[in-house]
Amino acid sequence: DTGVSQNPRHKITKRGQNVTFRCDPISEHNRLYWYRQTLGQGPEFLTYFQNEAQLEKSRLLSDRFSAERPKGSFSTLEIQRTEQGDSAMYLCASSTQSGPYYNEQFFGPGTRLTVL
Amino acid sequence: AQTVTQSQPEMSVQEAETVTLSCTYDTSESDYYLFWYKQPPSRQMILVIRQEAYKQQNATENRFSVNFQKAAKSFSLKISDSQLGDAAMYFCAYRGYGGSQGNLIFGKGTKLSVKP
């Protein structure tokens, strides 16, 4: 399968714990995006990378959130000191700036986080 | 700031019939992209159709077509010959046109049910 993959698919944690999610984009895609989707809402943008550079961060991305994309390949999203309000689906998407799918974002299956 | 509004939380259609999902948006930009995404239950989001704002012709992809009214800032999705597999959440999304415009702005979604 050459699509976007995310791990883990589900994560249950206790309030105050740290969690880390991983996203592996489609191999030739240079852009990678993180979104958060809460129940009954559309996805909300968190941040995106072009290669290894983090180009934009949403105001939703508090100091407890950090994202990295070392070497411009996979990306990790870490949430420190989790709160119940962090419970959501975390979606990753990737895109390329060439070819017939120029700038089309392909989404992964998401990581569902539950904070108890 | 750009916003996307989907005023129909739920819609229902009989199999083989036609249904139209509504979307309005607000932007001060003249060039941008609009999208409809489909998110089946417990499955990843996929792109249904896209429209470039500079194109006057409405986009069509098989049974899916849009009615793009730029002056009215309206972007509706028509699904013809509805099939059971069309049942899903449908999200309308906006993206700016410039090279640095990465993120998608989503509406809250419309849940489409298809009755056999």
Image (tube, rainbow, N blue to C red):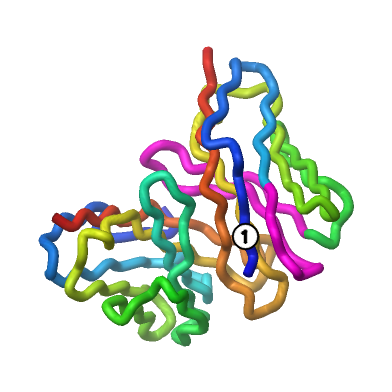
Q: Could you tell me which secondary element the residue under label 1 belongs to? A: strand
**Which residue is painted at 46% across and 56% down in the image?**
A43
Whether residue A3 is visible, yes or no, is no
Whether residue B90 is visible, yes or no, is yes
Please tell me whether residue B37 belongs to the stretch shown in magenta: yes
> A60 and B18: which one is in front?
A60
Residue placed furthest toward the right: B56
Circle 1 marks a residue in which chain?
Answer: B
**Which residue is painted at 63% across and 74% down in the image?**
B101
Stretch of the chain drawn in magenta = B24-52
Which residue is tagged 1? B3
* Local crowd size for mark 1, using a 10 Å CA cut-off: few (<14), some (14–19), many (≥20): few
Location of residue A18 in the rendering, given as x and y in whole percent from the top left corner: 16, 72
Quick check: A57 above or below B37? below
Task: Determine the main secondary structure of the stretch shown in magenta.
Answer: strand
In which quadrant will I find the C terminus of chain A? bottom left
> B10 and B114: which one is in front?
B10
